[in-house]
Image (cartoon, helix red, strand yellow):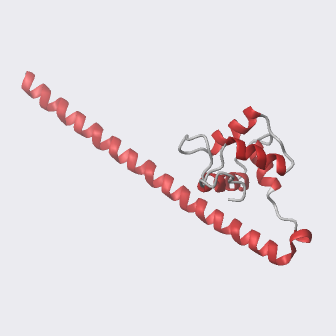
Amino acid sequence: MRYDAGKDGFIDLMELKLMMEKLGAPQTHLGLKSMIKEVDEDFDGKLSFREFLLIFHKAAAGELQEDSGLLALAKLSEINVALEGVRGAKNFFEAKAQALSCSSKFEAELKAEQEERKREEETRRLRQAAFQELKAAFSA
């Protein structure tokens, strides 16, 4: 990512601060923390590429608050065809389409994980009920 100064594959708080300043939408320290928290799936306090793409997915789906720094980031990341030309716009929209495709895969993965958790919980509940029945049989 362009603003990944540490070249570690993540955007941390300071890198996000610099990015927002360069984009002309500086944020407070608390605002930056709130931005990260809103899409930080693994709670590591920084943005992975996948979490960064989630910003654009949420913006397109209308899931961001109007005063959200993430919405400002998504809007600032739009393309100006007059400046970038048709080829630049083509590259931008192809990247956005790929990001949306990734986010669809992301949603499918989340749904699969939720269903797996439900199955595991149901299995645990059934085992616990069977154990209680056996326990009642032995104590009677």
Q: Give the quadrant of the N terminus.
A: bottom right
x and y percent of residue 96 in the render? 70, 65
x and y percent of residue 87 in the render? 81, 78
Relative placement, left or right, of 106 versus 36 is left
Q: Quick check: 121 above or below 112?
A: above
Closer to the camera, 103 or 17?
17
Q: Give the farthest residue toward the front.
A: 6
Image quadrant in which you'd find residue 17: top right
Q: What's the residue at 35%, 47% (across, down)?
A: 119
Q: Give the quadrant of the C terminus.
A: top left
Relative placement, left or right, of 5 versus 128 is right
Relative placement, left or right, of 124 versus 138 is right
Image quadrant in which you'd find residue 92: bottom right
Q: Give the farthest residue toward the bottom.
A: 87
Q: What's the residue at 34%, 41% (across, down)?
A: 121
Q: What's the residue at 50%, 52% (across, down)?
A: 110
Closer to the camera, 41 or 47?
47
Closer to the camera, 88 or 102?
88
Q: Quick check: 117 above or below 125?
A: below
Image quadrant in which you'd find residue 80: bottom right
Q: Is residue 64 visible?
A: no
x and y percent of residue 21 in the render? 83, 46
Q: Quick check: 19 above or below 99?
A: above
Q: Give the farthest residue toward the right.
A: 82
x and y percent of residue 75 in the render? 81, 54
Q: Is residue 91 visible?
A: yes
The mark tally for this picture is: 0
Closer to the camera, 129 or 64?
64
